[in-house]
């Protein structure tokens, strides 16, 4: 692979030439904030089985399994703070280089970093809602109930099931978010992908859609992806360091 500095300069020049870029992010951007990828060795999916949406609706026992995993996950989420990569994306938006962030993540760190247009393809773990009446709670309120061993929380208003505002396996993807993401991809001149294996469909099709519409692609990911062949610049280096240096170059009048 080409040395780091020439790749960095090339990527910075690509970003300088567009004013309608978008970012597409996955779990890898949040690992430097202390949030482990669920699929990584020792991750939650290795220690807990996946409870599907149908099971969640049908079985109190399955809901207890689901909420037990969430009880372990939520404290780490609440302690996490945006890292250098999140902050760099917010700065690029402020400078007019990014129109939006499309994310597969449920951690809310892009908003905490300062990005104002964030499309959450898999929802958010920062809140929960009643599946019957729609009443909503901050996830901190639900965590208090979980820690009191209420592992099947129901709505106080209508006794409906409470579920985090995330997309579970077997649950329909949010139509509006997906439509907005693909529309942005087809209008963008550049897509910056950070921290995604590009294996989870249909979200993983978004970079390909951008490429087909004429966008240039920059990938920052520790491992190879199925779409590496269509990226103009690829980084295997840490996302935080790469994005920090890249943003400085984009802000500089000369390289």
Image: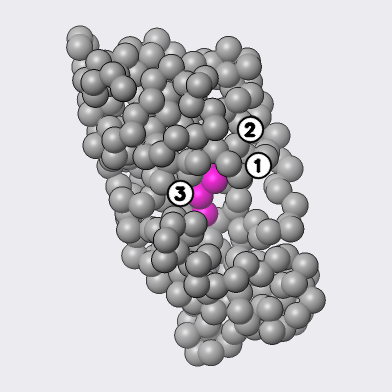
Q: Does dot 2 land on a helix, a strand or a loop?
A: helix
- Indicate which disc residue 27 carries: 3
Question: What residue is at 63 percent from the left and 17 percent from the top?
Answer: 212
**What is the x, y in percent for residue 182?**
65, 29
What residue would you read off at disc 2?
205
Q: Earlier in the sequence, mark 3 or mark 1?
A: 3
Question: Does the CB distance between marks 2 and 3 fall below 8 Å?
Answer: no
Q: Does dot 3 land on a helix, a strand or a loop?
A: helix
Q: Where does the magenta region start and end?
A: 102-106
**What is the x, y in percent for residue 64?**
63, 82
Report the residue that reaches farthest toward the front: 1
Number of other residues with Cα within 10 Å of mark 2, as a class: few under 14, some 14 to 19, many 20 or more: some
**What is the x, y in percent for residue 253?**
21, 11
Q: Nearer the viewer, residue 130 or 50?
A: 50
The span from disc 3 to disc 1 (Cα, nearest Å) is 15 Å
Question: Does the CB distance between marks 3 and 1 fall below 8 Å?
Answer: no
Question: Does the CB distance between marks 2 and 1 fall below 8 Å?
Answer: yes
Q: Earlier in the sequence, mark 2 or mark 3?
A: 3
Which colour scheme appears in the figure?
one colour
Question: What residue is at 73 percent from the left and 57 percent from the top?
Answer: 171
**What is the x, y in percent for residue 169?**
68, 59
Q: Does dot 1 land on a helix, a strand or a loop?
A: loop
Q: Is residue 119 magenta?
A: no
Query: In screen coordinates, is 182 left or right of 218?
Result: right
Kindly indicate the quadrant of the structure image that contains residue 255: top left
Kindly indicate the quadrant of the structure image that contains residue 128: bottom right
What residue would you read off at disc 1?
201
Total tally of numbered discs in the picture = 3
* Magenta segment main secondary structure: loop
The span from disc 2 to disc 3 (Cα, nearest Å) is 16 Å
- Indicate which disc residue 151 carries: none
């Amino acid at each position: 692979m080409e040395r780091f500095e020439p790749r960095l300069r090339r990527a910075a020049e690509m970003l300088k030439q567009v004013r309608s870029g978008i970012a597409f992010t996955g779990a890898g951007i949040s690992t430097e904030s202390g949030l482990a990828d669920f699929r990584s060795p020792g991750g939650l999916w290795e220690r807990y089985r996946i409870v599907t949406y149908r099971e969640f609706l049908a079985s109190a026992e399955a809901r207890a399994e689901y909420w037990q995993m969430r009880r372990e996950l939520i404290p780490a989420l609440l302690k996490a703070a945006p890292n250098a990569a999140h902050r760099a994306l917010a700065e690029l938006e402020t400078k007019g280089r990014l129109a939006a962030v499309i994310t597969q993540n449920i951690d809310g760190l892009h908003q905490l970093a300062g990005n104002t247009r964030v499309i959450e393809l898999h929802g958010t773990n920062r809140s929960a809602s009643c599946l019957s009446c729609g009443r909503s709670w901050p996830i901190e309120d639900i965590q208090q109930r979980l820690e009191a061993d209420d592992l099947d929380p129901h709505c106080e208003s209508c006794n409906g099931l409470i579920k985090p505002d995330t997309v579970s396996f077997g649950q329909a993807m949010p139509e509006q978010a997906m439509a907005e993401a693909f529309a942005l991809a087809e209008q963008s001149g550049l897509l910056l992908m950070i921290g995604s294996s590009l294996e989870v469909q249909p979200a993983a099709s978004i970079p390909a859609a951008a490429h087909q519409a004429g966008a240039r692609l920059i990938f920052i990911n520790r491992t190879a992806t199925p779409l590496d062949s269509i990226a103009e610049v690829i980084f295997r280096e840490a996302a935080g360091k790469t994005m920090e240096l890249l943003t400085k170059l984009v802000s500089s009048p000369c390289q």
